[in-house]
Amino acid sequence: MQAEIISRAQLTPDVISVWVKPKGIFVKPEPGQFYGIKIPEHNDLLLRRPISVADVHQHQLRFIFRIIGRGTEILARSEPGDWWDILGPLGKPAPIFRNRNILLCAGGVGAAPLYYLCRHLPRNNRVKVVIGARRSDQLILVHEFRKLVNAVLIATEDGSCGQQGKVTDVIARILPSLSEPVIYACGPRLMLVKLRQIASNIPVWGFLEERMGCGTGICYCCGIEDIYGNYLRVCKDGPVVLLNTVKL
């Protein structure tokens, strides 16, 4: 599917926000789903880059991604009027709960898919958002989250904003006060591992990130082992999975 770039913004020195408008029939993605984006005009970069949906407005999609290599660096240089080749929506969406205590745990650019999820959570949930980064200039979407929920907590490792420490430190502090919570988390792998330890008896739905080949479950390039010795395809069986069912 071809999609025209409508706008581009730099959120931090290495995080880019892009709005695109797909051409043709529009299928609205659900929270947790992603698109495979082809690197334009570079035939040597064959694999699509999987990027989660950060928001949807009318028939436009928002992608937020960190520049981590040559492919994303090329995508980051795109300008309004350019076109992307996108494949999606892909993956299984996140489960949606009602009338629960919900914790959204975001590390760095992991705030992007959790923001789209937050917009879709039923209003009878009691939602708290915890966003973490190394420094205050690496925080994203804080203002947008505060428009949706009252309780937005910040953690930075250098103490430049909010509580000094990691996002998991904040989660560990507030978790005992919540009755039967559900946690959604997206961020670095080490954050997910620590969160699983902290919330060992609580359902934690993790948004996983893996290198992908086809993005449709055929190649098993993104396989991750579960606790039963089977392999889940992050692109097809995820990317949102219960963390206590997989080996991280």
Image (spheres, helix red, strand yellow):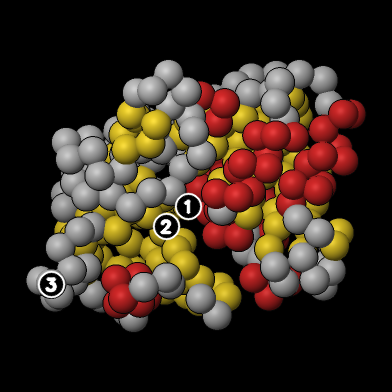
SS of the residue under disc 3 = loop
Residue occupying image coordinates x 63% and y 48% = 191
Residue 122 in sight from this viewpoint: no
Q: Which residue is mark 3?
A: 44
Q: Is residue 197 above or below residue 160?
A: above
Alpha carbon separation for disc pair 2 and 1: 5 Å
Q: Which numbered disc, 2 or 1, marks the residue that appears first in the sequence?
A: 1
**Callout 2: few (<14), some (14-19), or many (20+) C-alpha neighbours within 10 Å?**
many
Q: Which numbered disc, 3 or 2, marks the residue that appears first in the sequence?
A: 3
Task: Name which residue type carries label 2.
Answer: Arg
Residue occupying the far front of the picture: 229
Residue occupying image coordinates x 65% and y 34% = 196
Task: Name which residue type carries label 3.
Answer: Asp
The reply to whether discs 2 and 1 touch (Cβ–Cβ < 8 Å) is yes
Q: Which residue is mark 2?
A: 62
**Callout 3: few (<14), some (14-19), or many (20+) C-alpha neighbours within 10 Å?**
few
Q: Position of residue 177 (x, y in %)?
A: 89, 29
Residue occupying image coordinates x 25% and y 44% = 221
Task: Name which residue type carries label 1.
Answer: Ala
Q: Is residue 111 shown left or right of residue 102? A: left
Alpha carbon separation for disc pair 3 and 1: 28 Å
**Callout 1: few (<14), some (14-19), or many (20+) C-alpha neighbours within 10 Å?**
many
Q: Is residue 10 shown left or right of residue 70? A: right
Q: Nearer the viewer, residue 58 or 55?
A: 55
Residue occupying image coordinates x 87% and y 29% = 176
Q: Position of residue 195 (x, y in %)?
A: 68, 39
Q: Which residue is mark 1?
A: 54
Q: Nearer the viewer, mark 3 or mark 1?
A: 3
Q: Which numbered disc, 3 or 1, marks the residue that appears first in the sequence?
A: 3
